Amino acid sequence: MVRISLRNLWDHKLRTVLLGLAIVAGVSFVVGSFVFTDSLGRGFDDLFTNAQEGTDIAVTPTLDDENVGIGLDFPRIPADLEDDLAAVDGVADVRPVLQSFVVLVTDDDGSQQPAGGFGAPTFGISWIEGPSPFSIREGRAPTASGEVIIDVGTAESRGIAIGDTVGVAADGPKQDFTVVGLMGFGEADNLLGATFMAFSFEQAETLFEVDGEVNNFDISIEPGADLATTVEAVQAVLPDTAQAIDARAAAEEQAAELQQGLAFFNIFLLVFAGIALVVGAFVVYNAFRVVVAQRTRELALLRVLGTQRSQLVRMVILESVIVGVAASATGVVFGVLLAIALEAILEATGGTLPTAGLVLQPRTVVVGILVGTLTAVASALIPAARSARIAPMAALRDQLETRPTKPWWTWAGLTLGAIALALVITGARQASDAGALTGDTGPVQLVGAGAALLFLSFFLLARSVARPALAWLGRPLRSTTGTLARENARRTPRRTATTAAALMIGLGLVATVAIMTTSVEDTIIGSVEEAFRSDLLVQPAGFNPLAGIPDEIAPTAEGLDFVDSVARLATVEAELPADQTNFVVAIEPETVDLVLAFDDVTGSFADLGPGKVAVQQVEADLRGYELGDTVEITILGEPRTYEIVAFFTFAGGANDSQSYYLDYAALKETVPGLRDNSVSIRLVDGVELEDGKTRLAAALEDFPSVAVTSLSDILEQTRAALLGLVGMIAGLLFMSVIVAVVGIVLTLYLAVIERTHETGLLRAIGMTRANVREMIRWESILIALFGAILGVMLGLFLGWGLSVSIIGPGAQYAVPWLWIVLGFVGAAIAGVLAAIIPSYRATRMDVLEAIAYE
Amino acid sequence: MNEIAARAVNATKIYGEGDTAVVALDGVSVEFERSKFTAIMGPSGSGKSTLMHCMAALDNLTSGSVYLGDVELNSLSDKELTLLRREKVGFIFQAYNLVPTLTALENITLPQNIAGRKVDQEWLDHVVGILDIGDRLTHRPTELSGGQQQRVAVARALGARPEIIFGDEPSGNLDSKSGAELLGFLRTAVDDFGQSIVMVTHDPVAAAYADRVVFLGDGRVVSEMANPTTDSVFDRIKELET
């Protein structure tokens, strides 16, 4: 039996290879994900181990999570603690460290960090003499004012060399610095794409505008000193605002957190690998089914010769095991290559991830082999069971039996479809009724469950609708080859349907995601357009959205003759009623119309002032507020009472993140040092937007830490970000689509072999090779388009359900028709490509052999 | 008008090379007259099928030449041969004659449809009438009896009015009654339409329908007989075997 299995696989090498390919793709995806994330994980571990190199204890400000506000980040501690710390028993060395967000301006492009915060951050630090995560690679440490060193990764990507002059700004105006050295982080050139610039301590103090404070102290303990005791002793000399922590433990904790993040990332990737495997399972199932049917005579002969049913089943399963193991092993190899390619791509596109070499854990190999083999075997189970049902008499029968679709498939499909529709529609209804404000994920879960059922339902129904659908699809095909192609696709509806369903999965998901993102985009753009009442917005230029902008911006802008009015906005994190923790926003009542767009206001914003608050209507409804009620908001750890003076409804739909609005002047008094989040600017009538933008940017040239944006800039950024998201997910689903195309190749290939006699006849009575190729190509295109139509139908509906349930009230439903059309074109091209191997096989076929009969 | 529909001159076909070479045709020279029904007979391995394939532009000779009408086939490419088959040759095989996805009518007109030529409706009606398959035209091959299937194949072969029709045991899979009917139709095609037919068979009963029988053995023409009867063919075969 083993010999028959092996011989059978060997005799049909191309078929075996194609079968294997369907598994290889999924397995390599699984293995690639593991290797990639494992490698990243080790890179991060190394990085964090390195980051606390030589530091045993870190003294940092006591962080109160609830007191984050604009401009309040990077809290600092008194610098004069240094002497007290040095005097603690067991402390060998104390190194003060300064740190701040900065902006790097290079000569060549003059460009700053991307506005709005999509880029990696830029950090300025004081150079630490003694043990530190940084090491000088080239040049020397910064000692004098006007000197800076930069990390190697950034220097390479921005073309900076030792001796160059670069502009750096913290809060204040841009200053020029000479690059005197390049630094690395242990082995790494760069820290996850972030830019690091180090200055002498004194230079850092002036640049960051710090006096008598530091961000933290790095402490090394004396050899032999007990760490825990020393930590306690250090803590004892610290004020409440500072804390001593075990640096190594903290690093490990950070590393562990990152590992957890990576684990999520891995699961995210594995979901797509799983989809590819499911599609692969379809393909393998279909192929085994066809092969068992084609071998009916051979299997029946074995039965005639006295082979047990169970032996036949075992033989088929054995074949799937052999294919599965071989394909999985190949998949492991390809997976490692995939991880290498991924890293190379990330590196080439500027992402600088810590590379510590590839990590191939035994677990990865075991999972890969297991998953691939199980997929292959599970897919072959039903066909194997079918092989057992072949009667010995079938050996003597001539025609392959084509069994009609069992009606229960259709009924099951219809029932599942009805349930799925109900789930999706209910979910969407609930979402638009209740709104996302409640944070209820129920609707999304309903829609998600409905989506899964709908895919299953479509799979079941595909075989019932295949014949009429293909007749309709192929109607434009009037030529003989076209007619034959259409009828060939229709003659085995189950096979065609399963093949198309494999493609449907990938394309359906791509369509769903594309429609969701377009809907999100339209919704965001709609609300941004609605809400963006000013002409220009001044925002932090750098990565950190919490950095805020300098206080001087608003007065500077107000002094410009082309500026009509200026509105400031600040936010601070606070504890809100009902245990919510969120940002409260402060606005200037007289210019609120420049910042926010309302549909409806009850009460008046003009009444805002100390101890007054305006609340979003939906929140008020939820909590049962009346005008004049008081609410308690805790800011900077202190509960404060506010009287409600206004309710409002946003014009662009509900905003689920910020519901409480305070008076700007009052909040500035409550929170000293709070910086502006943004400044909105209306231009004088008659000033062109672009002109105004250029002139404002020029007027603010001394503040490189801010960026001037207009509505179109923001929309552009939103579009780019969403397009990136669609691109990424489509890329991840690409593997499934490839597997599905392999499925088409396999199905057609098997069909070509099955129709050997027929093709021979057609060739004999005058069909040219080109005709045969055309015939197979049309059949392939029809199958691919059938799958694409099923997928797009799913996508159109599920995209709607998911958009509505995720976005909530105010959701727009938008279909990217151009992409849908391109999807169909892509499917047709995939069909053409899938036909290449089968049509080659068909045209190379010897006509004489084809028309011979045994 | 040329009286020869097809001929082979010193046709030689060798399969394989060196020690494993098998000579299928060993310098066969034979002519098939126009408007005649010729049967090719011979035991298995005598080269009768190979000869037919080479004459019908399905296979190439190793040396020698074959002509269909005036056209010499050796120098033609696969595509040219295909077009030639489409234009000038009709086929009736023992089985698998019809495309299962097409109706009987579509099968009959298939060669014209592939070529993009117009179907001669009058001729088609005539042929269909003679073959008595008029009420079967919309049926798929699986809905037809074996005899009906072969008659559809004959209709297809006749439909394009080819220079010559090659039959490879056309009645081989049929019961004797259907077989006789089918051979009768072929006879009619020759007598009434002037169609040239060459048929490979090893059935003396079938061969008796022909005007002439060519006997092959070991890749050579070993004998010939005009106006055969079942008995005379049978006797000749016996003679040749001894």
Image (tube, coloured by chain):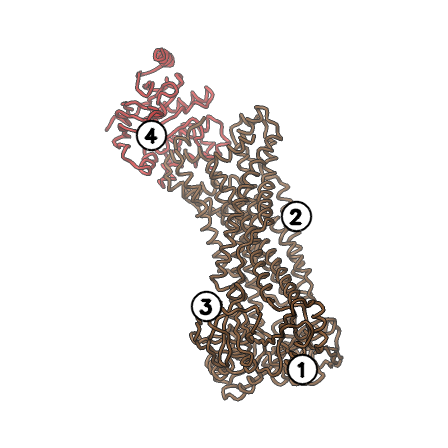
Q: Give the amino acid at mark 4.
A: Ala
Does residue B204 appear left or right of residue A747 in this picture?
A: left
Task: Classify mark 3: helix, strand or loop.
Answer: helix
Q: Which mark is residue B56?
A: 4
Q: How would you rate the neighbour count of disc 3 (Cα within 10 Å): few for under 14, some for 14-19, many for 20 or more?
A: few
Query: Mark 2 or 3 closer to N-term?
Result: 3
Q: Nearer the viewer, residue B134 or A613?
A: A613
Please say if A469 is above or below A670.
above
Q: Nearer the viewer, residue B182 or B27?
A: B27
Q: Which mark is residue A415?
A: 2
Q: Give the amino acid at mark 2.
A: Thr
Q: Nearer the viewer, residue A52 or A21?
A: A52
Q: Chain of mark 3?
A: A
Q: Give the amino acid at mark 1.
A: Val
Tag 2–tag 1 contact (CB < 8 Å): no
Residue at mark 3: A156
Please say if A162 is above or below A378.
below
Closer to us: mark 1 or mark 4? 1
Q: Chain of mark 1?
A: A
Q: Nearer the viewer, residue A357 or A692?
A: A357
Residue placed furthest toward the front: A224
Residue at mark 1: A671
Marks 2 & 3 on one chain: yes
Rendering coords of residue B240 (x, y %):
34, 13
Closer to us: mark 2 or mark 1? 1
Q: Chain of mark 2?
A: A
Closer to us: mark 2 or mark 3? 3
Q: Give the amino acid at mark 3.
A: Glu
Rendering coords of residue A393 (x, y %):
57, 25
